[in-house]
Image (cartoon, rainbow, N blue to C red):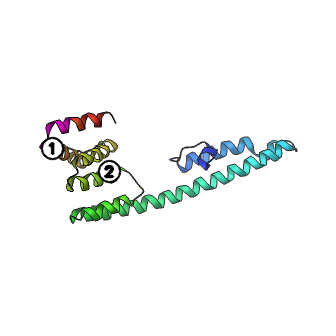
Amino acid sequence: MNAYEILNVPPTATREEIRAAYRQLARRWHPDRFMAGPERDWANDRMAEINGAYRCCLDGLTDARRGVEGDAAGLQQVQQLVDEGRYSVARKKLMGLNTRCAEWNYLFGWVLMRQGELDKALTFLSVAAHQNAKSAKYARALREAERKLSTGSPNRLSRLLTRMRTL
């Protein structure tokens, strides 16, 4: 079992959620609640497992935060590469990032569109627009990809839009 399963929290849990789950389990399995004997020994082992999972989850939060900050800086670098027209380099840089947030999907879709891979671009831009429905930038990019695709084969666009709706 991994640490999140032990604490019964999702990997996306906040510090407060992790702490609440830990406290609940600690109240239930603390060895002082058990009489001396095999049950207490078992509770002691269980509590050690819970403590380890708690530390691991908190460490994961710190690592994830570092990763998010690093990915944000990486996304800014990719945006600069896109602005400079260096699409191949931007694409490679995007593939090296851990995040798949709306901005990542937008940038990847934009790069694909500029490289002429309209089918794939439409997919990623649709995901970005879905992840952040309030973003005018993502909606504009999606409309541009749809427009470019529609100037090609009309059947191609309708097949692609039908496929996208089933996702």
| Extreme-left residue of the structure | 151
Query: In the visual, does 49 lie left or right of 36?
Result: left
Q: Which residues are magenta?
A: 148-158
Other residues around mark 2 within 10 Å, as few (<14) / some (14–19) / many (≥20): many
Query: In the visual, does 41 lie left or right of 158?
Result: right
Other residues around mark 1 within 10 Å, as few (<14) / some (14–19) / many (≥20): few
From the top left corner, tell me how far across and down residue 130 is, in percent: 32, 41
Query: In the visual, does 70 lie left or right of 158?
Result: right
Which of these two is toward me, 129 or 85? 85
Q: Is residue 50 above or below residue 95?
A: above
Q: Quadrant of the C terminus?
A: top left
Residue pictured at 23% horizontal, 35% vertical = 159
Q: Amino acid at mark 1?
A: Arg
Q: Are marks 2 and 1 in contact (CB under 8 Å)?
A: no
**Residues under labels 2 and 1: Cα distance?**
19 Å
Query: Would residue 2 be counted in the magenta stretch?
Result: no
Q: Main secondary structure of the magenta part?
A: helix
Residue pictured at 68% horizontal, 52% vertical = 51
**SS of the residue at dot 1?**
helix
Query: Would residue 154 be counted in the magenta stretch?
Result: yes
Residue pictured at 17% horizontal, 47% vertical = 144
**SS of the residue at dot 2?**
helix
- Residue matched to label 2: 105
Q: Which mark is residue 147?
A: 1
From the top left corner, tell me how far across and down residue 76 is, in percent: 32, 62
